[in-house]
């Protein structure tokens, strides 16, 4: 174990679009450590198929994009935040292009132009994409730039355990962040990192559910750490379920992009009947919460374990060119999407709530910022409009970088304590961790899913708290491992989701409860806030 803290000017937890963009923008002013628990390219960004929503054509307008976002958000968006992000979007997109990001283009009367996609909830074509691997291309461009910068250190296979705050050190208020304890997954060693400014860019919490489109890394680490440190958490009841994940026993978490419906894909039941007719004016292009609930209702009505997404009316050559990754992956699992419908089910996809932040990504803890999916900015409200998330990440990375550079902080302390392992021993009953992991994710799926009831939510809260007691005892009795730390974080996030859902006694956006099936006007613009005392 290192004898003294590893000191940097900036610590960034996470290596998706938000964290990498922020790191690039502050690196000229000091040393930056990017701490990422897997490889540097493993992030939710890397799996984003659809693209980035931004106003780039003469047929579109800021007002239209703002209106679509507010409509999807179910009365809970902060309009000032929405307008700011939409209007800053084109400049941030241009910066990404300058870094080397290549968006798909098309031929139009002899000249090349951006090939803008259509997605659910958008009234115009405004989705910039790189075929159906947009996230992968963004990661590639950003990582090339990161690798060329001498001030940036990327620490792979490092998992942040907990934020170190002045309150935890017994120092005078106001509370502020001083550093972070980090587990080196390759050595098992826990090191202390110190920096005056720490930025959470850890992504979401999809793995708290049994079925998710998210990669294994999405275990809510940033939200859980921030909550334990005293940051305010907002609107965690709003978990977006993507309506269309590939239904196949061997296809782990494979997403069928909303862009497939944007290009004319129609949802049907197993008898080929279109069930979105009459559900919403936009039919299969309705916002995600509407579509997910409609699929859930159709599956319960019919007893089927999935529905179908049919785009067989499109030529095979078009599908291979527009959706090469989806086409090849489905083919690998025995589905030729040019000849047969795609079997699909909803799956947990995106957390619209998170660590509450102000205009520049600042949390209520001095020195701690949150950007990307881990943050709750006020953009998404009760439901995220498709492809707004990557735009939000770019804008808030830029804002946070601008803020930290213009508001310098001295290191909180020069004497951060080392990690105390105590008398912990190596765990010899890892079956307890794996069992609790499965139980937690299944109960969240069964009791806190697309459609909720107070009875199921209360049952979930009781079981989550029982699991937390077991996990906490295990945490103190044994040497920490990445599996144990992620389970601890998932249990914390599960409790936050359930408590938030119980607190919102209405149905709004992604939160739908049979006990209160309609929105309540008095609760519009009321955020659900939780803070660890």
Image: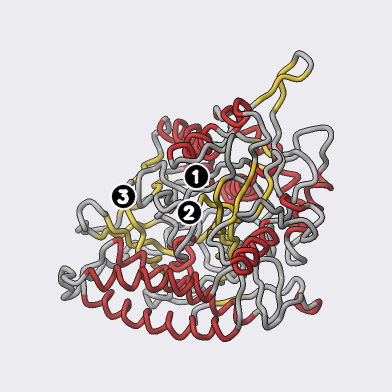
Horizontal arrangement in the rendering, residue 315 relative to residue 458 (left or right): right
Measured along the vertical axis of the image, is residue 75 above or below residue 68?
below
Look at the image and tell me whether residue 201 can be seen. no
Label 3: few (<14), some or many (≥20) within 10 Å? some
Element on which disc 2 rests: loop
Contact check, label 2 and label 1, Cβ < 8 Å: yes
Q: Residues within 10 Å of mark 2 (few under 14, many from 20)?
A: many
Q: Is residue 503 visible?
A: yes
Q: Nearer the viewer, residue 237 or 451?
A: 451
Real-space Cα separation, disc 3 to disc 1, in angstroms: 19 Å
Label 3 SS: loop
- State the residue at coordinates (40%, 47%): 34
Q: Nearer the viewer, mark 2 or mark 3?
A: 2
Residue that protrudes farthest toward the front in the picture:
271
Which x, y percent locates residue 33?
39, 47
The secondary element bearing badge 1 is classed as helix
Above or below, comparing residue 204 to residue 88 in the picture? below
Q: Which residue is mark 3?
A: 157
Residue at the location (76% across, 44% down)? 87
The CA distance from mark 2 to mark 3 is 18 Å
**Image point (62%, 48%), residue name:** 309
Please tell me the numbered disc located at residue 47: 1
User: Which residue matches tag 2?
Assistant: 214
């Amino acid at each position: 174990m290192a004898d003294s803290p590893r000191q940097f000017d900036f610590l960034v937890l996470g290596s998706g679009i938000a964290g990498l963009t922020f790191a690039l923008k502050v690196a000229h002013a000091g040393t930056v450590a990017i701490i990422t628990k897997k490889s540097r390219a493993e992030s939710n960004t890397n799996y984003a198929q659809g693209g980035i929503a931004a106003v780039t054509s003469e047929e579109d307008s800021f007002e239209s994009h703002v209106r679509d976002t507010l409509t999807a958000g179910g009365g809970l968006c902060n309009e000032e935040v929405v307008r700011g992000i939409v209007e800053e979007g084109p400049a941030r997109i241009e910066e990404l292009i300058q870094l080397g990001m290549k968006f798909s283009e098309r031929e139009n009367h002899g000249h090349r132009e951006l090939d803008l996609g259509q997605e659910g909830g958008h009234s115009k074509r405004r989705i910039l994409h790189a075929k159906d691997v947009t996230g992968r291309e963004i990661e590639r461009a950003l990582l090339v730039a990161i690798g060329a910068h001498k001030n940036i250190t990327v620490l792979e296979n490092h998992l942040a355990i907990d934020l170190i705050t002045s309150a935890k050190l017994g120092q005078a208020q106001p509370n502020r962040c001083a550093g972070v304890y980090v587990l080196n997954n390759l050595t098992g060693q826990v090191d202390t990192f110190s920096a005056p400014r720490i930025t959470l860019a850890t992504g979401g919490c999809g793995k708290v559910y049994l079925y998710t489109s998210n990669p294994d890394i999405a275990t809510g680490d940033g939200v859980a750490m921030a909550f334990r440190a005293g940051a305010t958490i907002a609107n965690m009841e709003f978990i977006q379920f993507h309506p269309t994940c590939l239904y196949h026993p061997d296809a782990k978490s494979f997403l069928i992009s909303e862009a497939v419906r944007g290009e004319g894909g129609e949802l049907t039941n197993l008898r080929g009947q279109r069930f979105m007719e009459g559900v919403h004016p936009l039919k299969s292009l309705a916002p995600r919460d509407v579509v997910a609930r409609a699929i859930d209702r159709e599956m319960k009505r019919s007893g089927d374990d999935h529905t179908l997404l049919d785009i067989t009316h499109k030529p095979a050559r078009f599908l291979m060119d527009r959706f090469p990754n989806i086409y090849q992956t489905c083919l690998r699992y025995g589905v030729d999407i040019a000849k047969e419908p795609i079997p699909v089910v909803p799956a947990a996809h995106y957390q619209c709530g998170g660590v509450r932040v102000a205009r520049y990504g600042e949390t209520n803890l001095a020195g701690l910022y949150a950007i990307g999916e881990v943050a709750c900015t006020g953009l998404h409200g009760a439901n995220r409009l498709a492809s707004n998330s990557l735009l939000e990440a770019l804008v808030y990375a830029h804002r946070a970088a601008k803020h930290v550079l213009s508001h310098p902080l001295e290191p909180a302390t020069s004497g951060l304590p080392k990690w105390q392992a105590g008398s912990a021993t190596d765990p010899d009953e890892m079956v307890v961790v794996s069992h609790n992991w499965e139980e937690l994710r299944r109960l969240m799926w069964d009791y806190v899913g697309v459609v909720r009831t107070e009875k199921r939510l209360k049952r979930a809260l009781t079981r989550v708290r029982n699991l937390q007691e077991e996990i906490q005892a295990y945490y103190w009795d044994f040497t920490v491992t990445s599996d144990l730390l992620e389970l601890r974080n998932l249990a914390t996030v599960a409790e936050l989701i359930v408590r938030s859902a119980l607190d919102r006694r209405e149905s709004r956006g992604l939160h739908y409860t049979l006990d209160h099936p309609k929105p309540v006007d008095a609760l519009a613009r009321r955020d659900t806030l939780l803070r660890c005392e």
